[in-house]
Image (tube, rainbow, N blue to C red):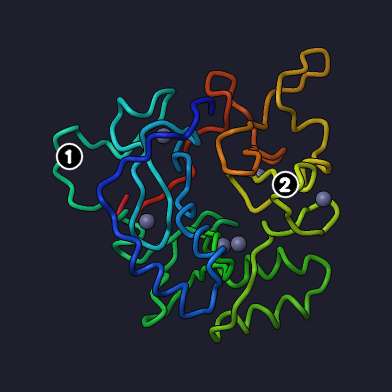
Amino acid sequence: MPGVMPHDIIDLDYDLMDGEVEFNEVGLNEVELNEVEGVFDSVCAFCDDGGEILCCEGRCMRSFHATVQAGANMCPSLGFSLGELHGLPRFVCKNCEYQQHQCFACGKLGSSDVFSGAEVFPCINATCNYFYHPHCVAKLLYRENKAAAEELERNIVAGGYFTCPIHKCCVCKQGENKEDSQLQFAVCRRCPKSYHRKCLPRAIAFEDIEEEGITTRAWEGLLPDRVLIFCLNHEIVEELGAPIIDHIKFPGD
Ligand SMILES: [Zn+2]
Ligand SMILES: [Zn+2]
Ligand SMILES: [Zn+2]
Ligand SMILES: [Zn+2]
Ligand SMILES: [Zn+2]
Ligand SMILES: [Zn+2]
């Protein structure tokens, strides 16, 4: 279960230059550029806990516990030995190395190589690290409008941008405001679903409410200015205090 504060991001002396140049080109201002440094995920992609995590220098921006020892609580980790870890000049995950990323809606792997038949495409939001099949994301964004969904799907295939569903509260459909605690987002780590703090249903609680059979699904202090949640679509496994860890797929697994 998540619980450790995310402090010790392993510093392999990575170099953000590529990222910065890229972000500059799309015209972000200085304030937003500063945020780019915080764009790496602050918790492990497998177990959603902090501690000593290793950041992928590819485009996924995810972090992972690198060794079995670093990731307590059933985290499979990347399975590196300490020797392997310290011998790494830089770390790029298998998804980024082979340009095969998972769709955050359906979980399936697809090519993200824009020069060779991409099947999954990244959300345009600069701080968002998720990829989607055009069909999957269009269906989520236009649940009740099939024609609009089909049009968006075609646009994305043709290279059009999209902003994925996590940037709007699923209850009130409004955006995030990190400055106002009630308007901060609680984001599901397993599917594209976000709530404002003020819009969180009672069943997504910060602590167990035994009388009502409610188990903890929300944690403070793991994501910067956000609440980490597992939404009601995912069963919490009692021993883990979290959903089963079977959601990460690497190519060739
Ligand atoms: Zn982990
Ligand atoms: Zn990666
Ligand atoms: Zn999909
Ligand atoms: Zn997004
Ligand atoms: Zn809301
Ligand atoms: Zn969810």
Amino acid carrying mark 2 in the image: Gln
Q: Nearer the viewer, residue 108 or 195?
A: 195
Farthest residue toward the top? 211
Task: Tell me, for residue 234, which label it has, or none.
Answer: none
What secondary structure is found at the residue carrying circle 2? loop
Q: Nearer the viewer, residue 107 or 10?
A: 10
Amino acid carrying mark 1 in the image: His
Res. 182 image quadrant: top right
Determine if the C-beta at disc 1 is less than 8 A from ligand 1.
no
Q: Which residue is mark 1?
A: 86
- Return the disc, 1 or 2, that comes first in the chain's sequence: 1
Ligand 2: quadrant of the figure: bottom left
Across and down, in percent, residue 126 comes to: 54, 65
Across and down, in percent, residue 210 comes to: 77, 13
Please say if 227 is above or below 145.
Answer: above
Q: Residue at position x 47%, y 34% from top? A: 6
What secondary structure is found at the residue carrying circle 1? helix
Please say if 135 is above or below 195.
Answer: below
Please say if 252 is above or below 48.
Answer: below
Q: Are marks 1 and 2 in contact (CB under 8 Å)?
A: no
Q: Residue at position x 30%, y 25% from top? A: 69
Crowd band around label 1 with a 10 angstrom C-alpha radius: few (<14), some (14–19), many (20+) = few
**Separation of disc 1 and disc 2 at Cα?**
37 Å
Q: Residue at position x 45%, y 51% from top? A: 40
Farthest residue toward the front? 30
Q: Is residue 101 left or right of residue 189?
A: left
Across and down, in percent, residue 110 comes to: 44, 65
Farthest residue toward the right? 172
Q: Which residue is mark 2?
A: 184
Q: Is residue 227 left or right of residue 96?
A: right
